Amino acid sequence: MSVLDASEIMDLIPNRYPILFMDKVDELNPGESIVVTKNVTINEEFFQGHFPGNPVMPGVLIIESLAQAASILILKTEKYKGKTAYLGAIDDAKFRKVVRPGDVLKLHVTMEKQRENMGKVKCEAKVDDKVACSAELTFIVPDPKKKI
């Protein structure tokens, strides 16, 4: 049983098809860590061009998936409830395994630091318990009354 299903995820973050890259939240410790499942299927639009005859999930979309999982972790804390989290920086991103249709991508995000409206998370995207991608992401949650 999931902690959050797709509908509950969409209640938290503004992403929608075709740019919502998660199916369910498996584990959630607000302000600490999250594990999310993304089922990778051949029906996804990006496989039409990346790459014909050799479908591979683009690395940038794996990073986007991790950022979305991080957004849920961040926005489930009381301090940021009802706000929007933005990606501020991507550091130390490494791609170690190709992600293909049929893979189940497990997104692991751990909170590292938090200050006022910013923070850092450590992320890993895994397939069959093997790291496909790792990165450190910086997020910003601006005051909704101020323009960024």
Image (tube, rainbow, N blue to C red):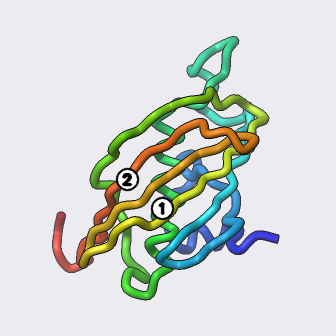
**Left or right of 143 on screen, residue 106:** right
Please name the residue shown 82% across and 71% down the image. 1
Hey, what amino acid is under mark 1? Answer: Ala
Snapshot quadrant of residue 24: bottom right
Residue denoted by label 2: 137
Return the residue nearer the eye: 68 or 115. Answer: 115
Circle 2 packing at 10 Å, graded few (<14), some (14-19), many (20+), is many
Q: Which of marks 2 and 1 is nearer the N terminus?
A: 1
Toward the top, the furthest residue is: 53
Expressed as whole percent of the image width and height from the top left, the position of residue 15 reads 50, 58
SS assignment at label 1: helix
Q: Hey, which residue is sitting farthest bottom in the picture? A: 78
Question: Which residue in the structure is indicated by mark 1?
Answer: 70
**Quadrant of residue 4 within the rendered picture:** bottom right
Verify CB contact (< 8 Å) between mark 2 and mark 1.
yes
For residue 113, side relative to residue 18 (left or right): left
Q: Residue at x 42, y 81 (%)?
A: 82
Q: Report the residue at 68% width, 39% height from top.
A: 130
Badge number at residue 129: none
Residue 110: x and y in percent read 50, 63
Q: In this view, does 72 lie above or below 31?
A: above
Q: How crowded is mark 1: few (under 14 residues within 10 Å), some or many (20 or more)?
A: many
| Mark 2 element type | strand
- What is the x, y in percent for residue 7? 66, 69
Q: Position of residue 69 (x, y in %)?
A: 53, 59
Say which quarter of the image contains residue 132: top right
Q: Is residue 13 above or below residue 131?
A: below
